[in-house]
Amino acid sequence: MVNFTSFLSRLRGWLRTPVRLPVLLGPVFFHELVRSGRRGRHTFLRLLYTGIILTFIYLTYSEWTIRSPLNSRRLAGFAFSCFTTYTLVQLSAVFLLTPAYLATTITEEREGKTLEFLLATDLGSREIVLGKMLARLANIALLLLAGLPILSLMEFSGGVAPDWVLVAFAATFITMLSLGTLSTLCSVYARKSLNALICTYLIVIVYLAVSATLQVVLGFPALAGVHLWAHDDALTVADLVEGFGAGNLPLAIMRLNQSLRTRSTGAVLLELLRNYAVFHGVVCAFCLGGTIARLRPVSRIHADGAPPRRRRAYVRPPVWRQPILWKELFVEADVRLGWAGKTGIFIFFLICLSPAFIELGGLFSRGLTHFLLDLDLQGPRGGGDALQSFHQWGDTRERMNLWVSIVGTASLCALLLIMLVRATGSLSGEAARQTLDSLLTTPLSARAIVAGKAVGCLVPLRTGWWALLIIALAAYGTRALDLWLVPAVAAAATIYAAFFIVLGLWLSAVCGVTTRATLVGLSAAIGTALAPGIPVAVVQMWYFNDQRGFRDLAPGFDLVYLFSPPELLRFLVLRGPSSLWTRFPGVTLVLTCCGHLCAYTVATIFLWRSLCNRLRVEVKAVEPLPEQEPALPPLAAKESLV
Amino acid sequence: MTSSTPAHPSYLASKSRRLALKLLTAGLLVFGGYAIARGLLERRLDAVVRALDDREPGWRLDDLQRQRAPVHDSDNAGLIVQALAERLPNRFMQHFYVQTSRRGTGPGTDFGAAVKTLPNLAPPDRLTPDQARFLRGALQQTENLARDARALADHRRGRYAIDHGPESSTPSPDGLGIRKVIFLLHHDALLSLHEGRGSDSLRACRAVLVAGRALGDEPSPAHQLLRLECWDEAILLLQRILAQRRPEDSELNDVQRLLETEASEPLAVLLLRGEMAFCHLRFSAVEAGRLSLFASRTSPPVARAFDWLARDAIKLPHAGALDYLAHRLALARQPIAAQASALRQWEKERSDNNLVGADIGAWRSGRLLKVVQNGQLRLRAAAAGVAAERYRARYGYWPNDLSALVPEFLSQVSEDPGVQAQLQCQRLFDGLLIHSGTRDARDVRRRTGPPTPAGSEVGFRLWNANLR
């Protein structure tokens, strides 16, 4: 009886206790959602995204109609081509935007010195991480859904099966989730937004490259069939390689493309999606778990100021006459990526350099074999050089030139983008650390501040400069690059670097927030690369029903494309039959290049002056008020009278 | 006691020191590893060369040249060949067909067709009137030279004056002029045969053989392969002569003796010794930097680096190739019957302990030996064919078996040097074929040298007397 009474009292007590359901998202999610929803930039981004999709679909249309008009027989194929274009644009947007949005999830708070306050609240790590991450993912999802009406219109043309649409959207959202969780994990570990951004892109690029390279193993059945442990049903090396490559989207698209020829697309599509989902599900779980589990310990380490890697202490040199430059060089010079980041960079550059190594190694091997298998071991008759008839230098030179034009240009463009991203976080980072006002109150001129910051953007790219030096040496060693072109390339690169750094600083000053400045800066960079396509598209629309007239004008468009920075850099390096030097008079090309570079120089000067003026205005705004007689409190005034 | 804080290095000093340390470590690792690998390679090569010095004294090229038997100028067919080549016009072979056919472009002449079909005549095919006129016109200016060239048939020995010069270059075999002379002799024999001068054509055939035989014990494999070209040319001519004429027994006997003497030369040993000597010479030149593999006037700067790397990269193939060739030479010196089993045994041992570079030696020696074996097979078949022709001339019918020729016409039935099986003869509806019984015709077709007309790929072919 007594037991029953105590049971009842316990039950009553339990029922009276307010039940608290486990909170998944918490207030951070709604705060982020509302805050980001009120920003006007989303509308602009949606418009831009749909505009890009429509542009690419228009290009697809012009490609389909350039030879013959579009009739009902070709409509289904055209619709499928448009769908492919749409999906590729969508996936590219996810790849570009997700890290840019989510790599700043935690670092933004850390840079604004508000993370400690957030962690000190009653909120759990899960609520903070999921809240911030899902709010930003929701923004990207809304952006992607902006293109849905275009896709719906395509359905009227037929040719696109509903399962393809579902699979495309499923793959897009899986990619977004996976990239989002990875970016958030990087954001937890990184001290700065830029580091997190670079680290995320590096991990993704290295994964894509390594998993694609490992597919070579499948070409060797003896190696691919090796069991990982002594059992007949054990996993083989091939299973491991295929499992590791299951999350590689380009590989999956290639396999899908191959299956289109064999007419077994449906089964392959589902199998690829299943494998893709499983791989990225594991990645999501790992990254999300790691983010939630490591948020507080890593934040504590960062707050305590313990460096991630102990280094020997050293004394910095005395402050120079340009203190901002000194600060950028000796205090904020290092982009600390940790061993994983450095390994990633190393692997990335190794992959970039591998075609040159393979080409030169193959040439050496062929030359040696040629000599060893030669009948009289001297090659040509009567010549002193054993391989005088070794006519492969010309081919090697051509291939190395192609490699330099692709890898060199890509590396240079990547460095320019990194400069831009660093510049976009430069002044806004000071503002976030609440040190900008202090900086502006110093006796330094606005020009000195901007110059110091601009030079500082060049410093942390040592690895990139080394890589460029190696590429240039390889090119010079094989005569793949004409020496007289090196100053021209250097001049063009200097002008672009100056432009992108000043643009980044200007955006940083104008936008105020690093994320916004970075996004706008990246969009501007992509815009400058794609801008020459706009007049071409306009002309093409003008000649909508006169494809022959358009084709007559087409050679001139190659000159217009020179106004794109990557294209100009590639043009300066590339030679051979595909080079523009063979198709246009040298004077025309030189004038075009000079005009283009002059335009960038003028834009740089304009931005520089605008930025200096803006900083001068802010200096005036934070100037202390002129000294006045301090107003005494009434009691003190009375006492003074007495 | 005062505690002093350690003095921290300055920023730049620390950075530069760290960079220097990294560079030093990387340099030590790279150059240390390179030096160790280079030392190991050199040690391996020295061991192989020392072993070769013990096993095969006098194997280097200088020693081989000193060991060669002297030939007096009066016996030297090589000097005659070189003198003839000098008297022949420049680019004689290239202009032979072109200039003559241009001269003959008149009414009633069709030298274009004649020139086109001339190199592909089957042995029983006779020259057309146009072809004969063409040859007559072409050889008109070199009539005296052809007569002097036929005089080579009276010689048996020779030695060409080849100056191998610096170790990085060897004069081209084309420079000897052998090809020019046998080209002349070939066309002279065609015309002689057409004009009924059978003995002249047979002398031309023997002269071709002697022109190759004059190479003697020349160690250069590239030059010795010319000898095989001479064999091919002589056998083709002999088939043609025996398909269209009935030579005297004494003339046939001379040809047969010459063929048998040539076939009995230890050419495999000679070629392997020369190959070994030249491999060592060339590889040593590359290792010493005297022979450039990649760099030339037009090559890019990386070619110098490649040459520098090749100096050490070639040491392992050098050692492996020398080791293999020395073993193969020892096998080639054994009796033919014992060679096959010994070779199998040694190949098995080699596969268990394969050396890098041995494959290079195997490939080089295998290619040479294959060519020599095919050539010797064809020489022996030709000698047996001549003996069969003599048999037919005496008894009026073909022999049923090659053993029927022994000992009256042939001392013994020859063997195929590749597979140690006796040659066989096969009666055909229009003649006789002498071939290696165990060899597929495709093996013989694979030999190097100029393309041969139809009907002559397999062994040696004879045609019935009523068709001549």
Image (cartoon, coloured by chain):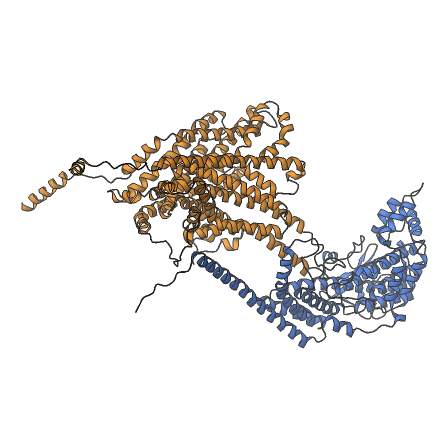
A48 lies left or right of B134: left
At x 67%, y 64%, the residue is B289
**Frontmost residue, A158 versus A420:** A420
Q: Is the residue B238 above or below the residue A354 in the image?
A: below
B182 lies left or right of A44: right
Colour orange maps to chain = A
**Frontmost residue, A482 versus B308:** A482
Report x, y in % for residue A491.
Answer: 57, 43
Q: Looking at the image, how many numbered discs can be counted on the residues?
A: 0
Report x, y in % for residue A375.
Answer: 72, 60
Q: Is the residue B288 above or below the residue A32 in the image?
A: below
Colour blue maps to chain = B
Which quadrant of the rendered structure holds the C terminus of chain A?
Answer: top left
Residue positioned most to the top: A545
Residue positioned most to the left: A1
Any part of residue A557 in sight: yes
Which quadrant of the rendered structure holds the N terminus of chain A?
Answer: top left
**Frontmost residue, A155 versus B86:** B86
Q: Quadrant of residue A625?
A: top left
Residue positioned most to the front: A642
Any part of residue B237 in sight: no
A370 lies left or right of B40: right
Report x, y in % for residue A523.
Answer: 46, 35
At x 56%, y 64%, the residue is B34
At x 69%, y 68%, the residue is B280
A126 lies left or right of A183: left
**Frontmost residue, A336 versus B227:** A336
Q: Quadrant of residue A555?
A: top right
Report x, y in % for residue B311.
Answer: 64, 63
